[in-house]
Image: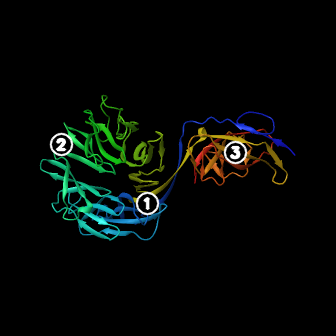
């Protein structure tokens, strides 16, 4: 019987081996699994929005026919999805002789603009999924861009003196009684609503600043006041407000003034309004165009052409880490995120279709655990060197399973025979039976190494909390 030890780059005697892998600050690995939501020849699609009601998740979107390159009247549908996969047939929300432009959805409600002509204001319509009933909230024909969250809907109204932002409470019924939140002076550029804030951009002295109304405290907040920058295309969720920033002279991706933050392109910033001193955090500032920030929890999703084509990225507010969601040779645009589901549009099939990606995160928790191993015993039956590796939670908080151990720096010719799979070119194994690893708790996994050359088995373990699949 032969005995070996496996170490973190150290040659030691048989018996217990201590793994002394040095881990960076907690980082995340992102696995995205994509599904096709629409695949309808002769039609284009836009503005996908993810919602979730008592039945489950759905993606609502705009669809329009394309005849000889000409876009026809747009309609709105929603598609049920389970774990990202479409289930059943799409459901018609609106399909009339006028254009229907989807704007937003939340739980049981979908809001859209009904317009007689292309890209023009119209009237706001509220559709209830559970009853399949629609109600028109306005009749003036000068409204656009509704957004909804919880009990409220906001939209913009175009007046002679500027654009104003109004608030409607769904439970108040129809005809809609609205409250002016902001505008028409200063005029409103765009708006968003979350559980806590209504946020909007407003035109002040020739440039856009971001302002907000705190629904919980009933107070107005000046979010930004930067004379040399346009800050617009806002998004809000929880305490966070995100927005695009660009120079006042070049708002759409051209070279920015040297006096402004960054050097060129469109940047994205975010502010935690719940912080003692709310300060802008740079989400993306790389000299390229970073657009359409969307927030869900501690994730800010956006699209960027930093790699050439537009691709979808995520910024984690808890770690400051940026992760790439999509990686294709097509432009991925019109992104939206809700929980662990992201959706977007691209034209890989010849016209714009809707896709979604299920997001799975695994956190590097090596700094939160101690990894030890037994010596390795050679088995003549399996012709492998067998041992046990134990992971102990040395942090002050519970770690969520499953737990993955990645064995890096293995010598060529040495393989982990019972590996679960590979990650970044290294084998990994899942520690069985771990749903939660509490402080001080340990879990073990059996290892089997194939080592035909009988070399010293050295490895550096990196431990992840979460799934790679």
Q: Element under label 3?
A: strand
Label 3, label 2: how far apart the Cα atoms are: 62 Å
Left/right placement of residue 4 relative to residue 169 reads: right
Which residue appears at 47% of the width and 50% of the height?
328
**Colour scheme of the picture:** rainbow
Q: Residues within 10 Å of mark 2 (few under 14, many from 20)?
A: some
In the rendered image, which residue does mark 2 sit on? Answer: 186
In the rendered image, which residue does mark 3 sit on? Answer: 390
Q: Residues within 10 Å of mark 1 (few under 14, many from 20)?
A: few
Left/right placement of residue 90 relative to residue 134 reads: right
**In this rendering, the label closer to the viewer, 3 or 2:** 3
Which residue appears at 43% of the width and 48% of the height?
312
Q: Earlier in the sequence, mark 1 or mark 3?
A: 1
Indicate whether 150 appears above or below 19: below
Q: Is residue 302 visible?
A: yes
Q: Is residue 350 visible?
A: no
Q: Earlier in the sequence, mark 1 or mark 2?
A: 2
Q: Element under label 2?
A: loop
Q: Residues within 10 Å of mark 3 (few under 14, many from 20)?
A: some
In the rendered image, which residue does mark 1 sit on? Answer: 349
């Amino acid at each position: 019987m032969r005995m070996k030890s496996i170490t973190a780059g150290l040659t030691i005697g048989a018996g217990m081996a201590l793994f002394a892998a040095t881990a960076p600050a907690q980082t995340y690995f992102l696995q995205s699994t994509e599904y096709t939501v629409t695949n309808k020849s002769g039609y284009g699609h836009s503005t996908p929005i993810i919602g979730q009601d008592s039945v489950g998740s759905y993606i609502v979107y705009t669809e329009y026919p394309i005849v000889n390159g000409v876009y026809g009247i747009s309609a709105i549908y929603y598609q049920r999805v389970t774990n990202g996969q479409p289930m059943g047939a799409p459901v018609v929300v609106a399909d009339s002789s006028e254009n229907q432009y989807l704007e937003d959805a939340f739980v049981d409600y979908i809001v859209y603009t009904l317009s007689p002509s292309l890209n023009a204001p119209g009237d706001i319509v509220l559709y209830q999924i559970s009853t399949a009933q629609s109600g028109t909230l306005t009749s003036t024909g000068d409204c656009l861009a509704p957004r909804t969250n919880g009990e409220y809907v906001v939209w913009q109204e175009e007046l002679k003196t500027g654009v104003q932002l109004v608030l409607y409470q769904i439970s108040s019924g129809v005809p809609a009684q609205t409250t002016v939140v902001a505008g028409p002076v200063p005029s409103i550029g765009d708006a968003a609503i979350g559980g806590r804030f209504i946020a909007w951009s407003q035109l002040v002295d020739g440039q856009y600043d971001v302002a907000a109304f705190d629904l919980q405290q009933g107070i107005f907040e000046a979010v930004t006041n930067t004379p040399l920058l346009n800050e617009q295309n806002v998004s809000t969720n929880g305490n966070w407000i995100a927005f695009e920033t660009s120079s006042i002279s070049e708002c759409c991706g051209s070279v920015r003034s040297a006096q402004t933050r960054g050097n060129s392109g469109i940047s994205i910033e975010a502010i935690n309004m719940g912080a003692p001193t709310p300060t802008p955090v740079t989400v993306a500032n790389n000299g390229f165009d970073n657009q359409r920030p969307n927030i869900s929890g501690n994730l800010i999703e956006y699209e960027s052409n930093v790699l050439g084509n537009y691709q979808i990225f995520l910024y984690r507010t808890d770690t400051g880490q940026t992760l790439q969601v999509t990686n294709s040779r097509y432009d991925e645009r019109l992104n939206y995120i809700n929980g662990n589901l992201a959706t977007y549009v691209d034209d890989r099939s010849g016209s714009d279709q809707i896709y979604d990606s299920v997001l799975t995160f695994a956190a590097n928790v090596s700094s939160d655990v101690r990894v030890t191993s037994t010596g390795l015993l050679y088995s003549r039956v399996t012709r492998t060197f067998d041992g046990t590796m134990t992971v102990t939670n040395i942090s002050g908080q519970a770690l969520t399973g499953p737990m993955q151990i990645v064995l890096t720096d293995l010598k060529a010719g040495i393989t982990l025979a019972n590996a679960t799979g590979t990650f970044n070119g290294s084998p990994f194994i899942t520690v069985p039976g771990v749903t939660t690893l509490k402080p001080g708790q340990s879990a073990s996994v059996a290892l089997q190494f194939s080592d035909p050359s009988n070399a010293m088995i050295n490895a550096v373990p990196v431990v992840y909390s979460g799934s790679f699949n």
